[in-house]
Image (cartoon, helix red, strand yellow):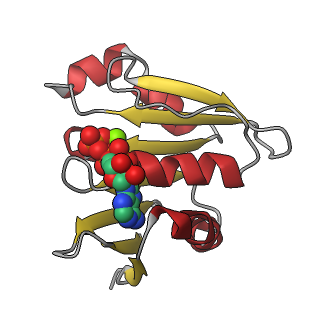
Amino acid sequence: MPMQPTSKTIHCPSPEALPAIAREVIRLAGTRRVICLTGDLGAGKTALVTALVSELGSDDGVSSPTFALVQDYLSVHQDPQVIHHIDAYRLTDLNEALDIGILEFLDDDAWTFIEWPEILTSVLPDHRLDIDIQILPDSTREIVILER
Ligand SMILES: Nc1ncnc2c1ncn2[C@@H]1O[C@H](COP(=O)(O)OP(=O)(O)OP(=O)(O)O)[C@@H](O)[C@H]1O
Ligand SMILES: [Mg+2]
């Protein structure tokens, strides 16, 4: 029997809580280096990536790579140092992702954060974190972290 993925739910009352949540995500990641983020437009995926990049020791400003598709940040103290940030929102098929070298990004040992990962599902590693962010009626967020 394959191991059931375990999940953890964290309530995020405001963006100020994101640094602590990012530290917890990094802890839960263990040896995983691929983290997928799902959730509606404006749910807070990029905001969490920003907190993760900052916790990993990069001062590089995170912006939404919606147009660039992939952006790299450099961490000053983590090994490996490169952090990939992919936003697949505008991808219409997997071949476009393969053309920009998605397999190389996934295969190196660098942290890789992926917003809108759905179209990439078939090439994602099994060993990864899936994070889903829900906007609650009071506009706070519920963050569900699945350890695959
Ligand atoms: N935990 C939170 N609580 C309240 N507001 C938040 C929270 N996280 C993010 N926000 C706010 O939501 C807005 C949108 O966040 P963000 O751009 O990160 O969303 P996104 O999921 O990346 O959207 P997209 O699908 O367009 O990439 C930002 O203004 C941000 O400050
Ligand atoms: Mg975003």
Up the image or down, 123 lies above or below 17; here it is: above
- In this view of the protein, which residue sits in the foreground, 139 or 47? 139
Where in the figure is residue 74, as x and y percent of width and height? 72, 31
- In this view of the protein, which residue sits in the foreground, 55 or 120? 55
Which residue is at a point 29% across and 32% down the rendered structure image? 88
The extreme top residue here reads: 99
Can residue 48 be seen in this snapshot? yes
Where in the figure is residue 23, as x and y percent of width and height? 65, 68
Up the image or down, 101 lies above or below 57; here it is: above
Whether residue 6 sits left or right of residue 62 in the image: it is: left
Which residue is at a point 43% across and 20% down the rendered structure image? 101
Where in the figure is residue 105, as x and y percent of width and height? 51, 31
Which residue is at a point 37% across and 23% down the rendered structure image? 69
Give the image quarter of residue 38: bottom left
- In this view of the protein, which residue sits in the foreground, 138 or 111? 138
Up the image or down, 117 lies above or below 96; here it is: below
Where in the figure is residue 29, as x and y percent of width and height? 58, 66
Give the image quarter of residue 117: top left
Can residue 116 be seen in this snapshot? no
Quarter of the image for the N terminus: give it: bottom left
Which residue is at a point 20% across and 47% down the rendered structure image? 41
Up the image or down, 109 lies above or below 146; here it is: above
Whether residue 75 sits left or right of residue 97 in the image: it is: right
Whether residue 146 sits left or right of residue 49 in the image: it is: left
Quarter of the image for the C terminus: give it: bottom left
